[in-house]
Structures are given as C-alpha cells and as structure tokens.
Amino acid sequence: GNSVTQMEGPVTLSEEAFLTINCTYTATGYPSLFWYVQYPGEGLQLLLKATKADDKGSNKGFEATYRKETTSFHLEKGSVQVSDSAVYFCALAQPETSGSRLTFGEGTQLTVNP
Amino acid sequence: GAVVSQHPSWVICKSGTSVKIECRSLDFQATTMFWYRQFPKQSLMLMATSNEGSKATYEQGVEKDKFLINHASLTLSTLTVTSAHPEDSSFYICSARGQLAGELNEQFFGPGTRLTVL
C-alpha cells in the first residue's frame, strides 16, 4: 500500500535559517504529492503540491520538487520566519486507485526562534 | 478559496453521552467529505469517506456504529460519536472535496473539533 515517511522532528531553527524537511514515499504508479501546514489549534492548509515527476511546487517561499527516481518530495525554504512555526505534513494521493484519498506522513514540528 | 467550517470548535462531554460534529462547505458543493482523527503530536488518521446521499465507507478498525456519519446534503456532513468514552477524546478534522473537471481536485480542510470526554 501507499505510505509516506517524513524526517522526525521536532526541528528548531533560528530566524533566517535554511529549512529542509525530508519526505519519501512508497506508491505504485504516479501519485500526486502535497505539503500541508497545520498551525496550532487549526486544521490543515495546503501549502504546495506537485502532480507529476520533476514538477516543482512553490508557495510563500517554500518549494518542493517531485523526484520520482528517489521517490522524494523534500520541503525547503531559504530563510524561515517565526511565523513559519507549525507542523508540516507530507501527503500523497493516487486518484486512479484510491479515489484521491490522502495518505499522510507523521508530521514534522517546526519551531523558529527569533 | 474554498472554505470548510466545523462546529463546534471544541466540546467537553460526560462519558456515555453522544456528541455531534458538523462539517460544512461554505462556498462550494462537496460531493465527498472525509473525517479524520488526530492524536496529539501524531498524523491524521482517515476514519471514513462519505459521499452525498450514500452510506459512508469506513476504514478498517473504525467502528461504524460508534462513529455515525451522515452526508445528507452537498454542503453538510455530520459525525456523531455515540456513547463517548475518554479514549474517544481527540481532535477531529473534516475535509471536503467538490466535483471539478480535469486533474486531481483538492481537499479543503476544516479547522477541527477538539473533543474531550470526561
């Protein structure tokens, strides 16, 4: 079955540091890949997505590239801000086999200190 | 963008009582709604998928008689936790997906409902 593995947290960075959160997946075929962000006490918000190999999703300074050869979708940001403190979830969906159900990784807690 | 609301945002109840949580799509018609459960510092666990006008499809290990899901209209789905017990305490999140042509259409998430059973 499908699965998503994220790097373990928590991750603590200083403001303006470079961020990488690793995400790898297992799936047959060609899934779509997502990063969601969850701020404290809130639901999930879609941060970015990529639907095919070599696509790069980007939003709010975050970006991730769909790498089929390494089955990865690592999240990066060049300079984090305190407001980026949240939990980040990598996820995949496979429309042709699962009706677009999302499979989530474990989540990575990010704390950015001023 | 599409907005999904949940009500209530938090609820505290006594053991043995039932609690209903509403999930509404405010500006689009949601043909499919999903219910998730999230434990502290853990990922989201899909509980069930509901399509408007039909019975929900429950994930393995989720008791359908305990977690009653109704999706009676294209903008409303409800989750009722029957005879709640302390182990049912959790953060419940719904998401909604409309019917769009073309590629994969996105799920939009509600803000979640914190259930505490005493």
Image (cartoon, coloured by chain):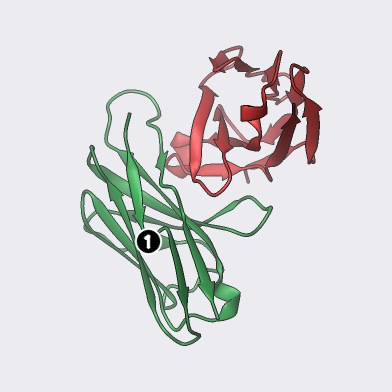
Chain colours: A red, B green
* Residue A24 in which image quadrant: top right
Q: Residues within 10 Å of mark 1 (few under 14, many from 20)?
A: some
Q: Residue at x 57, y 35 (%)?
A: A37
Horizontal side of B93 relative to A88 (left or right) equals left
- Which quarter shows the C terminus of chain A? top right
* Residue B58 in which image quadrant: bottom left
User: Does residue A68 lie above or below B34 as drawn?
Assistant: above
Q: Residue at x 72, y 35 (%)?
A: A110
Q: Residue furthest bottom?
A: B16
Given residues B118 and B17, the one toward you in this image is: B118
Residue A31 seen in the current view = no
Looking at the image, how many numbered discs can be counted on the residues? 1
Q: Which residue is mark 1?
A: B8
Q: Residue A51: where, in percent of width, then height?
A: 51, 21
User: Does residue A80 lie above or below A37 as drawn?
Assistant: above
Given residues A10 and A96, the one toward you in this image is: A10
User: Does residue B20 lie above or below A45 as drawn?
Assistant: below
Horizontal side of B35 relative to A56 (left or right) equals left
Q: Residue A31: where, in percent of width, then height?
A: 55, 30
Q: Residue at x 26, y 60 (%)?
A: B54
Q: Residue furthest front?
A: A114
Q: Residue B18: where, in percent of width, then height?
A: 39, 80
Q: Residue A45: where, in percent of width, then height?
A: 49, 35
Q: Residue at x 42, y 58 (%)?
A: B9
Task: Check the residue under mark 1 and report the chain it is in.
Answer: B
Residue A59 seen in the current view = yes
| Secondary element type, mark 1 | loop
User: Does residue B104 lie above or below B82 as drawn?
Assistant: above
Residue type at numbered disc 1:
Pro
